[in-house]
Image: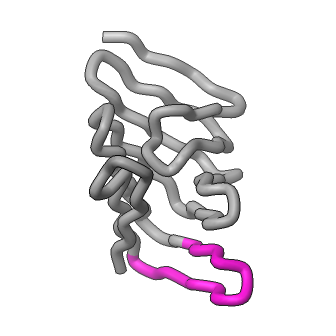
């Protein structure tokens, strides 16, 4: 399954793919699981994790799992993260950083 999240002024803020996805209509939450890859188009950010949740209510991605985030010029790794729909503002918990 794949999912695209739009942000005002952008066609698609990010595009995510995974092996499985669950959409909860009553809460507007999307849960992606297994080999999750989410690409933020604005800053060419690629996020990889095993589980990722998206809340339409606050337009934020969240996970408590291990994450690997690549951007031009660097790679961030850690466990747990929260970020906006475009992956331009990301907080990684328990992070390690590799700068190229």
- In the displayed structure, 70 sits above or below 67; it is above
Q: How many marks?
A: 0
Residue 86 in percent (x, y) is at: 43, 45
Image height of 86 relative to 69, above or below: below
Whether 4 is drawn above or below 20: the answer is above
Q: Position of residue 8 (x, y in %)?
A: 42, 51
Residue drawn at the location 28% of the way across and 57% of the way down: 11
Residue 52's place in the image compared with 22, above or below, is above
- Magenta residues: mostly which secondary structure? strand
> On the picture, is 71 further left or further right than 69?
left
Judged left or right of residue 32, residue 4 is left
The image quarter in which residue 43 lies: top left
**Front residue (pair 77, 59):** 59
Q: How is the image coloured?
A: one colour
Residue lying at the far top of the rendered structure: 100
Left or right position of 100 against 82? left
| Quadrant (top left/top right/bottom left/bottom right) for the N terminus | bottom left
The residue under the point 64% across, 74% down is: 29
Residue 73 in the image: state x and y as whole percent. Answer: 29, 16
Q: Nearer the viewer, residue 11 or 84?
A: 11
Residue for point 42% across, 62% down: 5
Toward the front, the furthest residue is 9
Give the residues in magenta.
Answer: 19-31
> Image quadrant for the C terminus?
top left
Residue at the image position 65 percent from the left and 53 percent from the top: 62
Is residue 7 on the magenta stretch?
no
Q: Position of residue 76 (x, y in %)?
A: 48, 27
């Amino acid at each position: 399954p794949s999912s695209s999240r739009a942000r005002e002024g952008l066609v698609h803020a990010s595009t995510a793919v995974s092996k499985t996805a669950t959409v909860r209509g009553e809460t507007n939450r999307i849960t992606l699981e297994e080999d999750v890859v989410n690409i933020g188009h604005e800053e060419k950010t690629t996020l990889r994790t095993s589980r990722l949740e998206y809340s339409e209510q606050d337009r934020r991605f969240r996970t408590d799992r291990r994450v690997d985030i690549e951007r031009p010029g660097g790679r961030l790794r850690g466990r747990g993260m929260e970020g906006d729909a475009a992956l331009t503002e990301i907080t990684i918990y328990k992070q390690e950083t590799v700068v190229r």
